[in-house]
């Protein structure tokens, strides 16, 4: 994952080195700014298996990015044969169900295999802080509907991690380290970010069967 304006050639160079030391059965997923088809092909050539990219809720209204730019990147990802990872986000109290469902349907149209729903975490000092945050119950309900609508064939995630979502069809959670745009602490593993051990405990409490490789 990089900031949107991180130099793509530097990113590709780092990714190539990472791919060389990763086990072959481990997927490598890019989370970067918008890019064209040629870059999508380069991502695939250095060993990426997929890319996370979305059209955010109220893109072009709450952001300065045109929705068409996001959609062009989504099309490039699919055209290049990379797996598209998608999410309905960042969900706040002001978003209507119609807006939210529009993004669910977009993911379904792209035949997304790994899907997620994420609520916005209000960080003090940011423009949308005063709009607040939806509840854990609301996020869990949205995650449940998202799974039904999009029917991801591999994984469904709710973010940030909440335990109750695991009874709503969620079967994937993320451990986090390093920078996190939802945290005011540089190393989120010391604050909001959960460890692999903590994630495993959440799955065990929800009575999931966990692979011995995890």
Image (cartoon, helix red, strand yellow):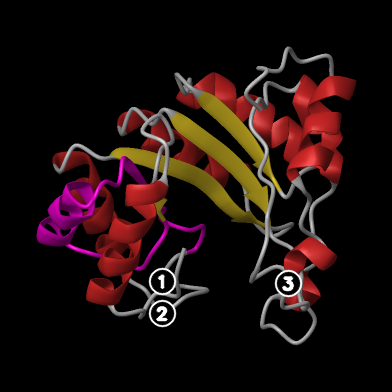
Q: Is residue 33 magenta?
A: yes
Magenta-colored span? 31-58
Q: Residue furthest front?
A: 21
Q: Label 1 belongs to which residue?
A: 60
Image coordinates of residue 105 in percent, x first then y, are: 42, 34
- Picture coordinates of residue 99, whole percent (x, y): 53, 48
| Residue 149: % across, % down | 51, 23
Of label 1 and label 3, which has the lower sequence position?
1
The answer to whether residue 19 is above or below residue 178 is: above
Quick check: marks 2 and 1 in contact, CB under 8 Å?
A: yes
Sequence-first disc among 2 and 3: 2
Identify which residue is drawn at 70% across, 68% down.
Answer: 182
Is residue 52 shown to the viewer in this render?
Answer: no
Disc 2: CA contacts within 10 A as few (<14), some (14-19) or many (>=20): few
Q: Residues within 10 Å of mark 1 (few under 14, many from 20)?
A: some
- Asked if residue 79 is positioned above or below residue 62 in the image, the reply reads above
Above/below status of 214 relative to 197: above
Q: CA distance from mark 1 to mark 3?
A: 30 Å
Task: Tell me whether the residue at label 2 lies in contact with that at label 3, contact meaning CB atoms closer than 8 angstroms.
Answer: no
Relative to 156, is 151 on the left or the right? Answer: left
| Residue bearing the label numbered 2 | 64
């Amino acid at each position: 994952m990089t900031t949107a304006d991180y130099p793509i050639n530097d990113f590709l160079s780092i990714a190539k080195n990472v791919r060389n030391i990763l086990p072959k059965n481990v997927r490598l997923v890019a989370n970067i700014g918008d890019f064209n088809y040629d870059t999508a092909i380069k991502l695939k050539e250095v060993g990426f298996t997929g890319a996370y990219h979305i059209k955010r809720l109220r893109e072009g209204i709450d952001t300065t990015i045109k929705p068409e730019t996001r959609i062009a990147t989504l099309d490039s990802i699919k055209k290049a044969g990379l797996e598209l990872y998608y999410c309905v986000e960042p969900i706040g109290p002001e978003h209507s169900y119609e807006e939210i469902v529009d993004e669910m349907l977009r993911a379904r149209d792209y035949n997304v295999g790994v899907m997620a729903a994420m609520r916005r975490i209000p960080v003090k000092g940011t423009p949308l802080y005063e709009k607040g945050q939806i509840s854990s119950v609301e996020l869990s309900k949205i995650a449940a509907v998202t799974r039904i609508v999009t029917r991801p064939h591999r994984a469904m995630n709710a973010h940030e991690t909440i335990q109750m979502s695991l009874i709503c069809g969620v079967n994937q959670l993320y451990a986090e380290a390093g920078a996190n745009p939802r945290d005011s602490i540089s190393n989120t593993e010391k604050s909001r970010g959960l460890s692999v051990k903590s994630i495993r405990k959440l799955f065990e409490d929800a009575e999931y069967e966990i692979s011995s490789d995890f």
